[in-house]
Image (tube, helix red, strand yellow):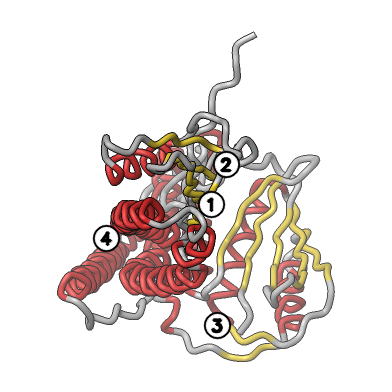
Amino acid sequence: MNAAAPRPFAWPRTLVARLFLIFVAGLVLAYGLSFASLFYERYSATRNMMLGDLERDVAIAMDILDRLPAAERPAWLPRLSSNNRQYLLGDGKADQPLGNDAARTAAQSIEAALGPDRPVTVRAMADDPRHIQARVVLSDGQPAILDIELSRMRPAPWLFGVLGVQLLLLAGCAWLAVRLAVRPLTRLARAAEELNPDKTSPLLDEAGPAEIAHAAVAFNAMQDRIAAHVAERMQMLGAISHDLQTPITRMKLRTEFMDPSADRDKLAQDLTEVERLVREGIDYARSAHGKAEQPARIDLNAFLDSLVCDYQDTGKDVNLSGDAVPPLLTRPHALRRILGNLIDNALKFAGAAELHVAERDGGHLSIFVLDRGPGIPAAELDAVLQPFYRLESSRSRDTGGTGLGLAIAHQLAAALGGALILSNRDGGGLSAEVRIPPA
């Protein structure tokens, strides 16, 4: 069995977190190196000073003890001793070899201070390798002991607190700097997400650092170019479609004066289809400007009931279901056109349609147009919302259409601030959801 591969380092998903993590890691590393260098320098300076004091102290103390009469030496021992160095008379208790660098360094300093004329033996205590004793034999043969407890150098407790506070302050400054640096990028990303060619989006604030201001100016210029391009495209489509109506009308009039024949009927039918295509092209061009209609508050229940009754009066199988909903602020003509296109599409492919109204969490309102027709392949649910797109199975004269009905509904839904969502139903059929945000 192969060993499991090591998992790669999981970076945070946001740029703010990544930059902050890099900054904090760099600060911690820099602080660690600075603290280690400072501590080592302080340790070296303190050790050299302590060894210098030790050499001078042991040389003077042993000289004094060597010159004193044996009877007076015990009285001088407390005067020569200090906090971690004690002078004793006798052979001492240390009998272990030196086991660490600090003890060996202290032994070398003692030997250098006493010189070759005064031999010294340095041993460590059995229970503490940092507790050593240096044995020197005085000129009268009496042994003297220098008892030393080598202390460990520890930083002051308050030093860690100061370093922690400094690190927190620097981390806070790094977090603020990262947020200030990334905030314009976040605004740019949000503006790009909200960019909609079918409606006017607010311009980005062009104030700030030179790089940010330049990016905002470029984005605003791009937004203006896109809006101008879309407006020009729609104007051109509307103009072409409008201008085509006159020759089509003349040709239809001419067919009326032709002798009855199968060719005349086919030509009339073709002209009717061309006329429908032109008319829907004009409707599509106008739907891009669906926001031109002023919003109005309507009784949605009565609005939908009236729409369904209009279809039922013409013998169409259209029904309404769902809960009663409060009045809605919307553009009534655009909403009627959306639902009309969806109902016509359902009637064309299924022969029947059902409107269902439901309120969603968050105040969203959904109006469903449901049918039991053949549905749409899942891979083409988004594609059918594009203009002039038709499924391969719907290119016949009876059901082919122009490919603009769903595109117009989709564009008008976006103009209302909502969305048109298509999905296939369980058991067959299509669900067209018009999702309207709260007013």
Q: Residue 247 carries which label?
A: 4
Q: Marks 4 and 3: in contact by CB < 8 Å?
A: no
Q: Are there few (<14), some (14-19), or many (20+) residues within 10 Å of tag 2?
A: some
Q: Marks 1 and 4: in contact by CB < 8 Å?
A: no
Q: Which mark is residue 88?
A: 1
Q: Marks 1 and 2: in contact by CB < 8 Å?
A: yes
Earlier residue among tags 4 and 2? 2
Q: In which quarter of the image is the N terminus?
A: top right
Q: Give the amino acid at mark 4.
A: Pro
Q: Give the amino acid at mark 1.
A: Leu
Residue farthest to the top, as pictured: 1
Q: Which of 412 and 157 is in front in this view?
A: 157
Where residue 236 sits in the image (x, y, percent)?
24, 65
Earlier residue among tags 2 and 3? 2
Q: Nearer the viewer, mark 3 or mark 4?
A: 3
In this rendering, the answer to whether 404 lies above or below 3 is below
Report whether 377 appears left or right of 163.
right
Residue at image location 61% in from the left, 75% down from the top: 437
In this rendering, the answer to whether 245 lies above or below 404 is below
Report whether 258 appears left or right of 168.
left
Label 4: state its secondary structure: helix
Disc 2 target residue: 92
Residue at image location 63% in from the left, 80% down from the top: 438
